[in-house]
Image (tube, rainbow, N blue to C red):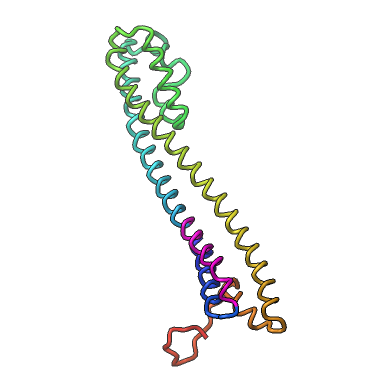
Amino acid sequence: MQDAGDVCSAIASGLDSDSEAKHLAPLWDALTAKADELAAARRAAERALGRARAKVTVMDSIWDPETAAFGRDVVDQSGGKRDQAPYTRFFKNASPSATQDFGVDREVQQGKDWLAELARNPNEPLATKWTPRLSVATENLESAAGARRNAVRAVALQDTAEELFIADINREIDILEGELLTLFPGQPKRVAAFLEPTKPRHKRFRRKGDSSGEED
């Protein structure tokens, strides 16, 4: 998006420098400002996504050991037998270690399922010890996952906004070319000069001994 803004700015500068085309410059100044706004929004959206992803990673790293500790406690309460309650109440379909590889959304749901099972007998030792701990770990993970989804959605909306803006720029370039041809009939080089910023940039070799810093 910064490249698009640079192109718009260069076109505006070229138009503004020619008294006969000067009246066309304000539109390109406005497009430059819009490109700058989109570039800033892109940076903000991507930064927010990075922060959201980092938070999910940390919350997941907290949830996993809590699950492991919960599993060990349940095994102990079952006398080390995995075919007896309370182990079969909480880990009938997946072992404690397996639940840690579920992925964030499924881990959140698993945490909620455990909490619902603990709520059936809130006064039992497992419930009094683990309901608050699993609640905090699961709620924090769910909140972080929700923030990440929102951040991903924001980046997707940003992608769409940029695609639409690029289409607008391309359309305005076509319109500008028509206006310039009308303003300067029979002067193709003059018209081309205004549109030079839209052309792919190719690095050119400087002449030996040229230290001006400008490309030939």
Residue drawn at (43%, 34%) of the image = 145
Q: Nearer the viewer, residue 20 or 128?
A: 20
* Secondary structure mainly formed by the magenta segment: helix
Residue drawn at (33%, 13%) of the image = 80
Residue drawn at (42%, 21%) of the image = 95
Count of residue discs: 0
Residue 85 location in percent, x, y? 39, 8
Residue 138 vertical position relative to residue 85 in the rendered view, above or below:
below
- Range shown magenta: 21-38
Q: Which quadrant of the view contains residue 59?
A: top left
Name, please, the residue furthest toward the bottom.
Answer: 209
Q: Nearer the viewer, residue 85 or 119?
A: 119
Residue 158 location in percent, x, y? 52, 49
Is residue 28 in the magenta section?
A: yes
Q: Is residue 100 left or right of residue 195?
A: left
Q: Nearer the viewer, residue 215 or 79?
A: 215
Is residue 197 in the magenta section?
A: no
Q: Is residue 163 left or right of residue 144?
A: right
Residue 133 location in percent, x, y? 30, 22
Residue 21 vertical position relative to residue 90 in the rendered view, above or below:
below
Q: Which quadrant of the view contains residue 195?
A: bottom right
Q: Nearer the viewer, residue 166 or 183?
A: 183
Residue 1 location in percent, x, y? 51, 60
